[in-house]
Image (cartoon, rainbow, N blue to C red):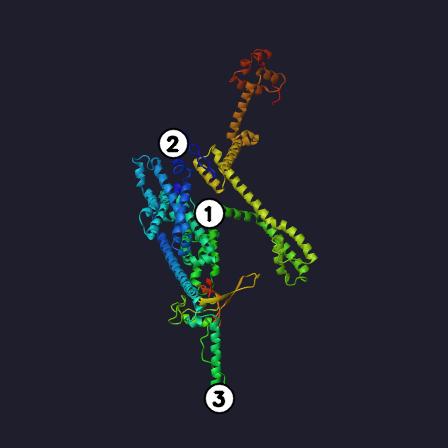
Amino acid sequence: MTEEPKLRGHDYKVEIPAGLPFKEWLYAWLLDPEIEGNHLKDVDQWIGLLIVGNMFALLFEHVPAVFEPNKGWFHLFDIISVTVFTIEYLTRLYLAPVDREFRDKKLSTLRYIFSPFAVIDFLAIIPFYLQSFIAVDLRILRALRLLRILKLFRVIIPAIQEFREANKERTFRQKMHAIVYPSDFGGKFHELFDSFIVLWVIVSVIAVVFESVQSIHYILNIEFVVLDALAVGVFTIEYFLRLYTCVEEPGFEHAVWGRLKLAKSTSSVIDFLAILPFFLEVFLHHLFDLRFLRVFRLMRLLKLTRYTEATATLGKVIAREWPVMAASGFIMLLLVVLTASLGYLFEHEAQPDKFENIPQSIYWAVITLASVGYGDLTPVTPMGRAMTIILALMGIGIFAIPAALLSTAFSDQLRIDREKLLNRLYEMLSLGKLSFEDADIINKEAKRLHMSEEEVQRLYDKAKKERELIDDVSAFPLHKIAAVPEHAVEHFKTLIAEIKELSIMTNREQFEQIAISKDRITATDFALWKSILDIIPNPSSDSNPSSGSNGSSGSGTPDRPNPNAQPT
Amino acid sequence: MEQIAEKNSPKKLGPTWADIVFLVFLAGVLVSVTLLGRLAFEEGMKTEKSKENGEAWVKWMTDNSAERFKDGFKPSVCSGGPTVAGALEHEKKELTKAAKLAAKKDGTEDEPITLPEIPIGTWGECFKALTAKGGPLSELTNAFTLEPLSLVAKCDPADLSTAGGFLLEKNVNTPAGSSIPTVTSTLVNSDLIIEKINVRVTICDKGAYPTKIADFDF
């Protein structure tokens, strides 16, 4: 029996059979790498985050101004981390006999204990317990805690192995491309690379935000400098890697023009702007005041747009709705200028300092129309106030247009994307069922569109139903069926089957009597009817003997059909 | 399908010359970023050194904020209290009287009197005394210019020569009901040091932006 491909939404969770022994069930539910949709990914993710948290804790412990007043919190975090790592270690130890890697070997638990990953896990927690029994120098203890970082290898090494396997027959540049760009060859290693970049983006943006807090900047000035240099190092390498390997991307194949094309793309410009302030500040700080450039480091946040579809959708939506939005913008502009002019006209004499000129009134107009109403500029004349009432009411409608447009366009875009997926499913179902490759494509697309498993299934059912409907050629007009000989043959078979069905269901004798006596069918048609019927036994005569008595003759067939009868 | 075609095509799988050139370039970029990072670090350390200068000043001033109102405090130009002010004023009067008498005796009454220099307790004098050779804060230097520490009127990003400079300000409470609780004004060299005031010590960082060190009574 062949296995059916499964369609999964972003919320797919595998159901582990409850009948399994607890150990096997727990392994399958939590750690089995072969079962897609279990909790292994969550475990890896949370352990990874805890390791990163430990790295930062270790860094901040070296800053007395941060560490000394928060010693208790640091200690608590350390205890939580070690507790989690210990639970993880003991769980893996407990599950070693059912672990795919060790279950077929003798002394599986012992073998697990001495496996490289288990040794790393053990080294990550043992210094904490050692300090309870032996007086260990705090500096040595901190250095030993660095071993926790090695736990990341549990994720990195399998990813590298998978990457090497997938890229065995590929060139150096293709391998680099697979790391940096999404492709069929990148696998988990590409995901790790993306996560690494995202982590640096988040860390560097948080650093930029906190740098603006005087009290934090005072304490962590040097740490911020080092962090920025490291972030720029990472982003610079990423930028050049993208530029070098982009020729492997479709549409960027030319060695020079392809790279130039990429350099001009929005995402590349963002990447470039993310690193530029650092170089400018280092080179030119003694000539100009370039502190304002630091704010541009927040542009790094835009790097995240590469990893989310939301911005791409927003781009599509704006591009699609641009004419309407431009028209709405024009109306807004018209209204603002008109309002400002009227405001100036009515209020200038009463408040010459506030409504000094039309440009100054524009500020008041925008604040009023947008329903912000700071209240720093208010009309005092009766005409001015009357106009403000009308404007405020108009503003609600006019300023809401772009928001409404965007929201409608967003849901439209979502509908279009889902329709595309439906069409794709529809095409894939031409053979009657989905292949594993097709299911994989659909699953990826469903994940991208953030569709739940239920939604994907509903879409699949819809596509299947439509496909079945379209496969029924009888629903087509006859000339369309006749245009395709295959369809014509199928249709002919359907018609014959229908005649057979009719003959079984009706009373043959009465049928023939009426057909002949009332000149309903031609002799040729009658002969055809008879030839079809020759291969089918008369059910009415077999199953319903009483019907025979109702017939006109024993044979049940007339001697001669009417040749003048009109064809039906 | 594409994958199979790709696998079947004969290819040199190791790094090509272009790859090697790129790797060398990437290594160069890494080295450049490291060097520039180090440069930024050194500049950052200069700001740290300036902060340490400011903290040393704050430490000395907070340690001596009570002491300076006691008799025999050294350096005397930094001592405070109404008695000191009165003594200085008295000394000035005495010297003027003596000079006038001497002028009368010499018959040079019409000529302007020149008084001998009286060590008056001003912020400028106090700063000079503290940073002079043998003074308690004489070791401090401007991390950016490597010259002895100097007082600046304000940290001015448009004038990068003020980087590493040292700014003393006076915090004065505003009357109750004001929108801002205190007003801060720069202490100039000629301001008297005799009264106890709330002082703000600020240093100018790499970009000549002010970095507040502390507010305290002195």
Question: Could one spot residue A85 in this view of the protein?
Answer: yes
Whole-angstrom CA distance, mark 1 to mark 2, is 41 Å
Q: Earlier in the sequence, mark 1 or mark 2?
A: 2
Residue tagged by mark 1?
A307
What amino acid is at disc 2?
Pro
Q: Is residue B102 above or below residue A160?
A: below
Q: Where does residue B205 sit, x and y in percent of width and height? A: 44, 63
Quadrant location, the C terminus of chain A: top right
Chain under numbered label 2: A
Q: Where does residue A253 sit, x and y in percent of width and height? A: 43, 49
Number of the label disc, if any, that sits on residue A21? 2
The residue carrying pointer 1 sits among few (fewer than 14), some (14 to 19) or many (20 or more) residues within 10 Å by Cα, namely: few
**Foreground mark, 3 or 1?**
3
Q: Is residue A213 above or below residue A306?
A: below
Q: Where does residue A192 sit, x and y in percent of width and height? A: 40, 46
Does dot 3 land on a helix, a strand or a loop?
Answer: loop
What amino acid is at disc 3?
Gly
In front here: A550 or A262? A262
Question: Could one spot residue A260 in this view of the protein?
Answer: no
**Foreground mark, 2 or 3?**
3
Does dot 1 land on a helix, a strand or a loop?
Answer: helix
Residue tagged by mark 3?
B107
